[in-house]
Amino acid sequence: MSKTLAEKVIAQHVVEGKMEPGKQIGLKIDHTLTQDSTGTLAYLEFEAMGVPRVQTKLSLSFVDHNMLQNDFRNADDHRYLQDVAAKYGIIFSRPGNGICHQIHLERFARPDYTLLGSDSHTPTAGGMGMIAIGAGGLDVAAAMAGEPFYLEMPSIMGVKLTGKLTPFASAKDVILEILKLISVKGGVNKILEYFGSGVKTLGVPERATIANMGTETGATTSIFPSDNVTKAFLNSQGREDQWVPLAADEGAAYGEVLEVDLSEVEPLIALPHSPDNVKAVSDVEGTPVDQVCIGSCTNSSLRDLKTVAALLKGKKVSDKVSLTISSGSRQVLENLAASGDLVDIIRAGARILENGCGPCIGIGQAPQTDAVSIRTFNRNFKGRSGTQSAQVYLASPETAVAAALYGEITDPRKLAYYPKVTLPEKLLIEDSMFIFPTKPFKGEVRRGPNIKPLPSFPPVPAKLTGEVLLKTGDNISTDDILPGGSEVMSLRSNIPEISKYVFRYVDSGFADRALTKGGGFIVGGENYGQGSSREHAALAPKYLGVKAVIAKSFARIHLANLVNFGIVPLTFTDKQDYGAVAQGDTLEVDVKGLERNLRVKNTSKGLEFKVDLNLSDREKELLKAGGKLAAIKAKHEGK
Ligand code: MIC
Ligand code: SF4
């Protein structure tokens, strides 16, 4: 039977379950990656599993998020990560080397492999024909310990690309077009698989941009074929021997197909505060701009920054605008420097930041009050920039440059001259900021005082009772649940402290109220927990006593994180019942046996409503054991 490309790669790696959409499967994981802000917890969890060395083909630990060193805390985390990497056989990418996804794509990604990463934009490597999935740190730790990664077999959505992009439209506009069509929840439990004659017109960095931001549709992952373009990219990285051809079989059937004619894609922009709030740039032209930030794992490749340099060459950034540039990797920066492109960027008046995530997660460069900030990033949730009143727009590097030069949102086609950017056949490559775990590790793993032991929790009780501590609307993101920014992010290895920030900008009294009331329930709308993979958004509420979340629907990674930490995820059987629950109501639900169909008593209103607990037997076992860590520990102790 003909297979889609995704099915072929999955079939090579499936170790449990049937590959039928909606059924649980277990996948063997070849590569894992972590980054510092999820990695500290992931490695504390890995250590607790008692496995002497990682069991994967390759595991990588990056430091790219918490780069500010205002005090000892982030630096201590970096040192902890470096020690753990050396001890357990993990490649360590030193601070300053760049963003995990960009570097993994350059130096490690390979077609027909699987990757699990503790970061939601791990699907970037789908640009290289990998099945690359974002997950909570605990799932990644389990994969490092040799466990399969369990997930619901997604349905495969074909995305047929035809035609060729016109000047000033780029890969970012393609994914914005797709977001406009299917929204931030249109990809949930799906894989976006790209095919068609338009694919070969896109380079690997462009494919990676599209796969990266497929995450914003809620998709499990995105994948492109591996073809001669892939081969040329691997060759430029000195890794041609890792190439294999990969494409869907002739006649492969997709659950549904979306068609995008690249020649019709125009410059697009996502308006505040959601990545799917997409309009044509020409519709919002003239909006004054205060800040432009170019970089992030979506748009910081050599292709992007060479384009930026060529468009800025000989020009000056508007004096109303602060333009920041953060390249995705040291390799990108080095190649820009060697070709002279960096000089054009500096002369135009850009502020050059460190290679890393930086402003994308509010680590510096928070814009001024009420600022309009145009960013080449992938998320514009309210407050994520560090300034609650800022208006953040998402656009391509081309559109970002136009805004920086004109001081207002401008259709980049006004720039008239479109440079033909070509990438060198062979790049400058220098891997000295990786530490390869070749020598045996001696001594103790060093932990700073901010690295606190993991909290442990008892099994889920038979009956859950308590108040509705908070009722939210649709599309609540993990940035709403637990914000980014340098203040909160430096507490990622300290659950008692970070839990004080849960829902800080949604409802500043939440954490105190949860503790005072002895925990309780959260009621949510559709797509609850969209966005990042941070398991802190489950673990910190659990620490505050949250027992269950009742929502209309959940985002994939957050749902898994809730189960992993023993918060019961319930969905309204009839979504209308959402209207019958208010904040402050007292609820009661008998979850003994973890049945699929349950009834919740609203004792404040004297009402009852039905909810579903749609979990596999394996997930129920995790809840019964008090979470995934307890379950894995028990398994390894029993060996
Ligand atoms: C993000 O873009 O939101 C992050 C920060 O990279 C997160 C990970 C984290 O919260 O540490 C993600 O996307 O998973
Ligand atoms: Fe870093 Fe931003 Fe990418 Fe997250 S989305 S990994 S914060 S660059």
Image: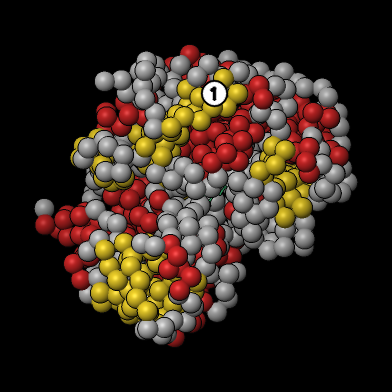
Q: Quadrant of the N terminus?
A: top left
Determine the image quadrant of residue 621.
bottom left
Whether residue 637 is visible to the viewer of this picture, yes or no, is yes
Residue ID for mark 1:
161
Element at label 1: strand
Is 465 positioned to the left or the right of 224 in the image?
left
**Quadrant in which residue 286 is drawn:** top right
Of residues 28 and 39, the one drawn nearer to the viewer in this rendering = 28
Q: Is residue 294 above or below residue 537?
A: above
Q: Is residue 332 found left or right of 458 in the rendered image?
A: right
Pick the front one: 99 or 611: 611
Q: Residue at x 81, y 38 (%)?
A: 410
Q: Is mark 1 within 8 Å of ligand 2?
A: no
Viewer-proximal residue among 627 and 547: 547
Identify the residue at horizontal 43%, vertical 45% (top origin).
188
Question: Which residue is drawn at the image coordinates 49% and 78% (left, top)?
Answer: 583
Q: Would you identify the image quadrant in which residue 283 lies?
A: top right
Vertical relation: 372 (above or below) 427 = below
Q: Amino acid at mark 1?
A: Leu
Q: Position of residue 605 (x, y in %)?
A: 41, 83
Residue 426 screen position, x and y as percent: 56, 17
Left or right: 403 in relation to 259: right
**Horizontal and vertical percent for residue 544?**
41, 75
Residue at 21 percent of width and 54 percent of height: 618
